[in-house]
Amino acid sequence: MFYCPCDQGRGATLDAFRTAGAPHRDERPLVPLNELDERIVHALAEDARRSFADIGQLVGLSAPAVKRRVDRLRATGAITGFTVRVDPAALGRQTEGFIELYCRSNTSPEAIERGLARYPEIASASTVTGEADALVQVFASDMRHFERVLERIAGEPFVERTKSVLVLSPLLRRFSSGSPG
């Protein structure tokens, strides 16, 4: 899973530092969430260790009813997993930056994903609209490390050029669809 860094804008999921790619959203048709499901998902996004009984008190359902809904949300792919958010600095990653990738013609999103999957410093990568073909979020130990990662990515055969920016201060990080209305 590729989640933004977390709590107070300082953390990231452990999965963000793994080299495997995230499942594509289009692999399963998603059923739109109703208001009650959104409230359950929001409660889990705040604390995935929260008990079904606690969530039930928040949303007005019994613990078994919450469990049935969570099981359904997992089965339909609305909930893709549960994870822990870790401060990247605890993993020695204190420098955050974004790299815009401008790829050679006829480069598929799958080729970009395969090429980037081996970089443990990449927290997320997405194809985007606009001039760039993809946007990559990187966590590095320091500026020198970020520069080395940037140079390695720029040297990938599918990359024509890159443009990078460094994060000075994270202003807002969200891990769910926001407050449940």
Image (spheres, rainbow, N blue to C red):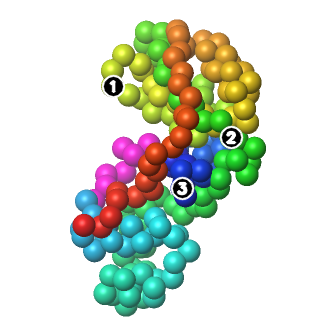
The amino acid pointed to by label 2 is: Gln
Q: Residues within 10 Å of mark 3 (few under 14, many from 20)?
A: few
Q: Quadrant of residue 96?
A: top right
Left-right relation of 18 to 113: right
Are the residues tagged 1 and 3 within 8 Å (C-beta)?
Answer: no
Please tell me whether residue 60 is drawn above or below residue 111 in the rendered image: below
Q: Residues within 10 Å of mark 2 (few under 14, many from 20)?
A: some
Q: Earlier in the sequence, mark 2 or mark 1?
A: 2
Please tell me whether residue 91 is drawn above or below residue 48 in the rendered image: above
Q: Choose mark 1 or mark 3, whichever is in front.
A: 3
CA–CA distance in space, label 2 to label 3:
14 Å
Spot occupied by residue 175 in the image (x, y as percentages of width and height): 45, 56
Numbered range of the magenta stretch: 23-31
The amino acid pointed to by label 3 is: Gln
Is disc 2 placed on a helix, strand or loop?
Answer: loop
Q: Main secondary structure of the magenta part?
A: loop
Q: Residues within 10 Å of mark 1 (few under 14, many from 20)?
A: few
Q: Residue at x 38, y 88 (%)?
A: 57
> Is residue 25 covered in magenta?
yes
The amino acid pointed to by label 1 is: Thr
Say if residue 132 shows up in the picture: yes
Residue linked to disc 2: 94
Residue linked to disc 3: 8
Residue linked to disc 1: 129
Spot occupied by residue 102 in the image (x, y as percentages of width and height): 47, 15
Say if residue 109 shows up in the picture: no
Are the residues tagged 2 and 3 within 8 Å (C-beta)?
Answer: no
